[in-house]
Image: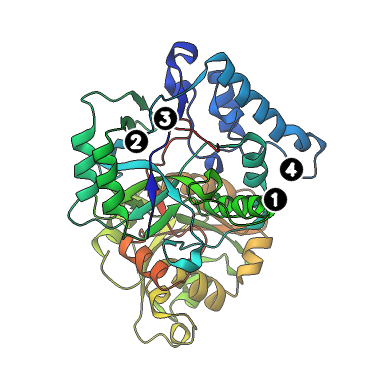
Amino acid sequence: MAIVAPFRAIRYNPARVGRLEEVVTPPYDVIDERAQAAFLARNPYNMIQLDLSKQICRPDEDTCADRYGQAARLFQQWLEEGVLQEDESPALYLYWIDYTHPSGRRLTRKGFISLVRLEDFSTGVVKPHEKTFAAVTDDRLRLMEATGAQFSQIFSLYSDPEAVVMTALEKGRADAPVCEVVDQDGCRHRLWPVDDPAVIEAVREAMGGKALYIADGHHRYTTALRLRDRERERRGGELPADDPYNQIAMYLCPMEDKGLSVLPTHRLVRLPSALGDAGALLDRLRACFTVQELSEGSRESLVAEALARLDEHRQAPAVFGLYHAGEDRCFLLFLQADCAEWKAVDQPAPLRGLDVVVLSDLVLERLLGLSHERCETQELIEYFSDAGDALDLAVKEAGSGEGVEPVVFLMRPTGVEQVRRIADEGLYMPHKSTYFYPKILTGLVIRRLR
């Protein structure tokens, strides 16, 4: 059973830092070097100085040795100076995000931030859908150990068809939020502490029988498990149920929320020159796909038409858009039901229903001969939530003369129910299978391990 609890959040003091927009950031793993420099230039109290970007340095560089210690000293300094302040009362934090979906619809995603008791994945209470990599958890583990804090929350889903939890929290909130921030994408983030004991108990009771599905933050959750296990070893046994090392802060959103959106993650694939010609590429793909070339137009309009057509076919078996940058041609690819190569792919039924699996296991590996290992070691694939960014880079690389031919595979989003089914059956999706949008901000709520 999922056990949730209120806590005293640490939050920025606007009187000391000015505009909150200048100090909060997206999650660390989407911040590159250019964005990092921009965040630092905004405000000396920017969150990037605490929740370190993974691009700051490589683990083998001497400067890495103290970057975690520097973050810990800065965190303590900001607490002492009143830059960061701890709330007086333990609370659950109602967190709404108003945003514009790429379709143009205006939506509000409603969730809340709470402490959640850590559970091993084997218990089935907290369910992942992606694998994690030790190099990433090593970095986050060192940061959490040094600072004694959790700067960003794990984004998880739960099922609540009757909206019992959110109804209770909304009744317990004040009229005005304690903070309101508009991020770089124009999304409005609002936060309300809810500290009414009766409301908190109602939420605890309602959440008690639910499973939690990690949407975003698999590495951060795995890091917390490793930190808990280290603390057990240090103390020589099990920890009390309410010990801070037995808990993690999560942003929890109901699966049924009308504002919950999953966007596709498009793939730029750098094909070897032997596969780069559109005719040769399509000859291979026609073994399993029906190919439709889209009408003439600018590359932007071709891609826009492909994305619209993908949305029209959102209930069909695997469908992709394919843009060939070197020849400025765009196609739709429809999986054929009698494809022998696909029938030969050994994957469980839930995974066979994912476009990302069809692309990785059938298109890239079997039809094009590009193994998972080769794609990773030679960096043949790059991932984009924005199709326009993928398009721009493909066009740029098409004229670079580097001996590869960039093509963009345009994807449909993975559905929430697909995520749930994969997690329920203990399976794992390929890398970058989901993109839950918008991202929750780092720095709105900080949790100290004490």
Can residue 6 be seen? yes
**Amino acid type at image mark 1:** Arg
Can residue 332 be seen? no
Q: Nearer the viewer, residue 195 or 102?
A: 195
Seen at 56% across and 50% down, the residue is 224
- The disc, 3 or 2, on the residue closer to the chain's N-terminal end is 2
Rounded to the nearest angstrom, the CA distance separating label 1 from label 4 is 28 Å
Quadrant into which the N terminus falls: bottom left
- The disc, 1 or 4, on the residue closer to the chain's N-terminal end is 4
- The disc, 4 or 3, on the residue closer to the chain's N-terminal end is 4
Residue on which the image places disc 4: 58
Quadrant into which the C terminus falls: top right
What is the number of the mark on residue 234? Answer: 1
Query: Do the residues bearing badges 3 and 2 touch, measured as CB atoms within 8 Å?
Result: no
Residue on which the image places disc 3: 184
What is the number of the mark on residue 93? Answer: 2
